[in-house]
Image (cartoon, rainbow, N blue to C red):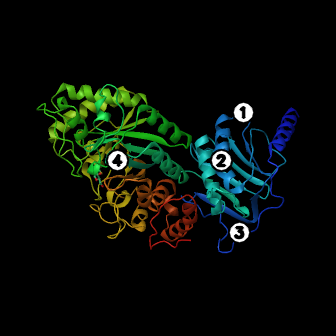
Amino acid sequence: MRHRHTITRLLAATALALPLTLPATPAAAAPAGTPARQLTDVIPAPAETRPDPRDTFTLGPLTVIRTSPHSTPARQVGRQLAEILRPATGYPLPVLPVHATPLPEIALLIGGADARLGQEGYQLDVTRRGVTIRANTSAGLFAGTQTLRQLLPAQIEASERQRTTWAIPGGSITDHPRFAYRGAMLDLARHFHTVGEIKAYIDLLSQYKINFLHLHLTDDQGWRIQIDSWPRLTTVGGGPGTGVDGAGPGYLTKADYKAVTAYAAERHITIVPEIDMPGHTNAAQSTYAELNCDGVAPPPRTDTAVGYSSLCIDDELTYQFIEDVIRELAEITPGPYLHIGGDEAHATTDEDYTTFMRRVLPLVSKYGKRAFGWNEVMQVDPATDVVAQFWGTGTTNTDLAEAVARGNKVVMSPANKAYLDMKYDRNTPLGLSWAGYIEVRDAYDWNPAQRVTGVGEDAVLGVEAPLWSETLRSLDDIEYMAFPRLPAIAELGWSTAASHDWESFRTRLGAQAPRWRLQDVDYYPSPQVPWL
Ligand code: TNX
């Protein structure tokens, strides 16, 4: 009874807060040509959907967002959902941390959900009375709200009030991810991308249930993260004239980096920072002469060649430098992983590479992080907690298969499937083509657990779509290469292998286009997709 009282008071308070300009009647029906949403029109495809065509919930001016009482995380997800839904609907959508209300409601509840949902799954039920999303964690609840967002008409993405019926198809969804790691990568070294651009990309990633963003922070052409004990790395190594063609200067201060990790965390995305070594290090070595075996700083480089730089393996200063960088970066990284690169070290002998990695990998553990490395790192038989990121184009890799047999886990980023910087076809104005052209169907039609011999379902931690930025400068460039292939990789990471179906995927993908247009996403209109 006491609860009742609280609710009545809260509702009274809410009613007072309602703007006086509520529309008197629900707005006009959806304009012709906008087909009604189906419960299955979601990317990534949910694990189980049970449509109930007799039921539809229509969001209206009196709808409230109700969150588990006393749950700050549920309330946070509720506020985020309200912010997404308010501009286009014009409805107040108050967020009330209470027990059931007599009003039509979207209930966001943490706890008491089916154990099968795990840490990121959710259950979504739509009846005439309202929508209920239940999850075991706020990550699951957030994932459920992203599904709900896609179940609403596309106009929900508009930044101004729209006249339409905000119908949500009835039925229920039970959903949880196939893989724990569903990543994207952005290369800040070849062209720097600002905090605003990174946040905009995070907003898009979170809509497709991506939960890791790997930032490639250093390379031959630029150093993009502040390190206090080596201050010229950013002012010189990331300063004016750096980046490909000298056109991508800039760096993240520690405050910027913290802002990015916090913004990502609010969207249930964890940042994985990468410092590439012992190759891809010209920006550091041209800045600090003492990081070179001959003590002479090479000139800065703004071309796109790879494999020419190497740290000095026999010099103790190299390890002091690496330890300083790892320590400072680990300190500002809330997530569990720190990526040490290790790719294309063609200017380092195999013996030196092994010596180097065997000294550096333990430093990552020393500062409380779990190391990630490109698949070359598996050559040195690292500890089994080191994650391999596979970027090859083939289907066999002995070092990787042996590492998996020992117990290492793998993130799959095959360059000829998952690289978002590859051109779609010969006419694509941006991007590279060394791993081939990747049309949407190529990006979608592969199985991460059947790609490399000896690397099966249990060994796969997940998938990641890297976006190298030799040719990319603006957010528009990023969007054009990522959309529509990023949602394809997101679906491979989240949805069951049994649900894999190109015809279904291309139809659902085509239906995303009106959302992207309203969000100003500059996508590639692939001829393989029936765009709405
Ligand atoms: C290979 S993939 C690289 C990068 C390039 C990329 C361009 C990998 C681990 N190394 O240095 O930017 O190709 O597609």
Q: Pointer 1: residues within 10 angstroms few (<14), some, or many (20+)? A: few
Find the residue positioned furthest to the left.
Answer: 294
Q: Pointer 3: residues within 10 angstroms few (<14), some, or many (20+)? A: some
Q: Where in the figure is residue 372, as x and y percent of width and height? A: 35, 40
> What secondary structure is marked by label 1?
loop
Q: How far, Cα to Cα, is label 1 from label 3?
A: 38 Å
- Mark 2, residue position: 83
354 or 244, which lies in front? Answer: 244
Q: How far, Cα to Cα, is label 3 from label 2?
A: 22 Å
Q: Amino acid at mark 3?
A: Ala
Q: Are marks 3 and 2 in contact (CB under 8 Å)?
A: no
> What secondary structure is marked by label 3?
loop
Residue 181 visible at all: no
Q: Nearer the viewer, mark 1 or mark 3?
A: 3
Q: Nearer the viewer, mark 3 or mark 4?
A: 3
Q: Are marks 3 and 4 in contact (CB under 8 Å)?
A: no
Q: Is mark 2 within 8 Å of ligand 1?
A: no
Q: Earlier in the sequence, mark 4 or mark 2?
A: 2
Q: Pointer 2: residues within 10 angstroms few (<14), some, or many (20+)? A: few
Q: Earlier in the sequence, mark 1 or mark 3?
A: 3
Q: Where in the figure is residue 412, as x and y percent of width and height? A: 37, 52
Q: Where in the figure is residue 510, as x and y percent of width and height? A: 53, 68
Q: Pointer 4: residues within 10 angstroms few (<14), some, or many (20+)? A: many
Q: Nearer the viewer, mark 1 or mark 2?
A: 2
- The mark found on residue 70 in the picture is 1
Q: Is mark 4 within 8 Å of ligand 1?
A: yes
- The mark found on residue 30 in the picture is 3
Q: Earlier in the sequence, mark 1 or mark 4?
A: 1
Q: Amino acid at mark 2?
A: Glu
> Which residue sits at x=30%, y=60%?
432
Q: Amino acid at mark 4?
A: Gln
* Relative to 209, 130 lies left or right: right
